[in-house]
Image: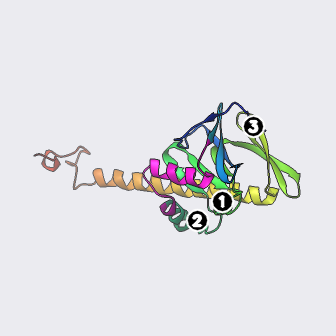
Amino acid sequence: MFNEDRQLVEEYEINPYTMIIFPYQYGSKTFSKVVEFEEEYTSPFKPIDLIKRSCEYFFADFEGRKKGTRMLTGITHKAPIAIDPLSSIFFLPTTSPTNSGCIWVSHEHVLHHKKYDSYSTRVTFRNNQSFILPVSFNSFENQLLRTALLRTRMMQRMKETERRAGYLFHSPRFTDGAGLVSENNRYED
């Protein structure tokens, strides 16, 4: 299932190439197996800790991202997380994030999925690599749809903010009547 030559990395931030993060038992500790588009790594941190650290790397915290998901979508359990919406880094958990067996999947990299058996789903990623995940087809499909909803609502919010900023800077208060910024409204020290 995994390349045994994968590198051990002390510091890892989820990035646009990260496809999936598995929990990995190493003695009495839980590590992470990280699969990127072309590389695989082992991290001495739990998957949830990688998610939290990566949220912080992109100037947010996990609890704030969860709260934002709840506010935009109403999703309260097994909430997808927008780690970095500007880079389209959205991850979905396969179970409750507090569950030690929770696998985190990048929404962006899922190419397709199909039922493997009653309790498992085969997920194929954009690089054509497949994994059989211990989550029912319906549950996985629901998580994909919830993450798509989060992405859509977040993009709508960002576009609305952009539109409002455009109105602000092109309103008569800031223009000279011809649509140009007036000299009177320039910031000078």
Query: Does the CB distance between marks 2 and 3 fall below 8 Å?
Result: no
Q: Is residue 156 left or right of residue 143?
A: left
Q: Amino acid at mark 3?
A: Phe
- Position above or below: 119 against 15: below
Q: Secondary structure at mark 3?
A: loop
- Mark 2 surroundings within 10 Å by alpha-carbon count, few (fewer than 14), some (14 through 19), many (20 or more): some
Magenta span includes 112: no
Q: Nearer the viewer, mark 2 or mark 3?
A: 3
Q: Earlier in the sequence, mark 1 or mark 3?
A: 3
Magenta span includes 54: yes
Label 1 and label 2: CA atoms lie apart by 8 Å
What is the span of residues highlighted in magenta in the rendered image? 43-64
Using the rendered view, name the quadrant where residue 72 is placed.
Answer: bottom right
Residue 106 visible in image: no
Mark 3 = which residue? 2
Mark 1 = which residue? 146
- The numbered dot on residue 173 is none
Q: Amino acid at mark 1?
A: Arg
Q: Tell me which residue sits at (12%, 45%) in the image.
A: 188
Label 1 and label 3: CA atoms lie apart by 28 Å
Residue 115 visible in image: yes
The foreground one among 70 and 104 is 104
- Mark 3 surroundings within 10 Å by alpha-carbon count, few (fewer than 14), some (14 through 19), many (20 or more): few
Query: Does the CB distance between marks 1 and 2 fall below 8 Å?
Result: yes
Q: Nearer the viewer, mark 1 or mark 3?
A: 3
- Mark 1 surroundings within 10 Å by alpha-carbon count, few (fewer than 14), some (14 through 19), many (20 or more): many
SS majority, magenta: helix
